[in-house]
Image (cartoon, rainbow, N blue to C red):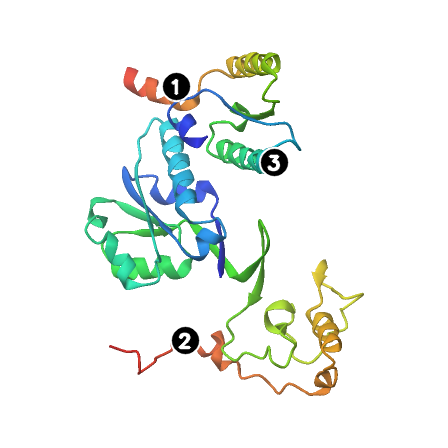
Amino acid sequence: MMVAFQKGADGVYVVGCLEGECHFLTGNLRAKKKVEYAKKLLDEIGVGGERLAMYNIAASDGPRFAEVAREMHEKIKAQGPNPIKGATLNKKAA
Amino acid sequence: MIVAERKPIDEIIGFVKNCKKILLVGCNECVTVCYAGGKKEVGVLASALKMAFMKEGKELEVEEVTLERQCDHEYLEEIRNIIDQYEAVISLACGVGVQFLAEKYLTTPVFPGLNTSFMGVTEESGVWSERCQGCGQCILGQTAGICPISRCAKRLLNGPCGGSTDGKCEINKELDCAWQLIIDRLKELGRLEDYEKLIPIKDWSTERAGGPRKIVREDLKS
């Protein structure tokens, strides 16, 4: 997750199975907590934790997957580009 | 194990704010087990530091290495050939590792990435609590395996104080009274008569009161 942002991603979302239906029993619940931790860290360094999200979607639910992708796209568009990219571009321009 | 937690990211950034190239050194022992300074945490911190610098329009090169231990010469020697290439080192070991690394490499500034908290146990995943203060004179044999030095806020040696209520400590209602635990355990073991035996005044010179401590084993010395 962190490396994706470091490489310039404007937003990242992690998709797990529906809660209670994970093949690895609690893997998706643990992933949710790790996402929360990473969000806090992203807030601390000023990248913005709201750029990261976790969704739970059933493997067979294609329409919901597409819906979430659109939702996340809109969310990130509203926030603008990853501030890291902005700073790097400004430096290059200068 | 020694339990630690990461320092606030701003504090760590402050240590290296004028650097361009740093070495981030993790430790494979205690701090890996408590998810504070192992290989994974080194990777996450490296990413966070790089991003924090990039956001300011700066660049920080971070080399990641995780040693088996930072409290032994042989493992610290593994970075001897590379350490001079860096302006600073951030160690994600406990305070012991940070100091040993700094003692060994005198020309490179070494900064701590963790706050070392205590010697303790993993109560459950993500929860650690203190069990030992290294007083140098273990009395667990008399206290049913429960340490009043590390678990009683007042470090009392002979029974609970007046602040013990319903088995909880007066400093925090969530905290078990160590002496209540000792008494309950002695009862279960059928050794309640041990509670009547007074523990003599403790010689605190074996604890921190005697200054930094050292153990020498002549049979093992080279």
| Labels 2 and 1 in the same subunit | no
Q: Which mark is residue A29?
A: 3
Q: Is residue A78 above or below residue B98?
A: above
The chain that hosts pointer 3 is A
Q: Which of marks 2 and 1 is in front?
A: 2
Tell me the distance, in whole angstroms, between the alpha carbons under discs 3 and 1.
34 Å
Number of residue marks:
3
The chain that hosts pointer 2 is B
- Residue at 68% in and 81% down: B158
Asked if residue B97 can be seen in this view, the reply is yes
Q: How crowded is mark 2: few (under 14 residues within 10 Å), some or many (20 or more)?
A: few
- Give the residue type that dot 1 points to: Gly
Instruction: Label 3: state its secondary structure.
Output: helix
The chain that hosts pointer 1 is A
Q: Residue B213 carries which label?
A: 2
- Give the residue type that dot 2 points to: Arg
Tell me the distance, in whole angstroms, between the alpha carbons under discs 2 and 1.
53 Å
| Labels 3 and 1 in the same subunit | yes
* Residue ranking furthest to the right: B166
Asked if residue A94 can be seen in this view, the reply is no
| Percent of width and height locating residue A33 | 58, 37
Q: Which of B87 and B27 is in front in this view?
A: B27
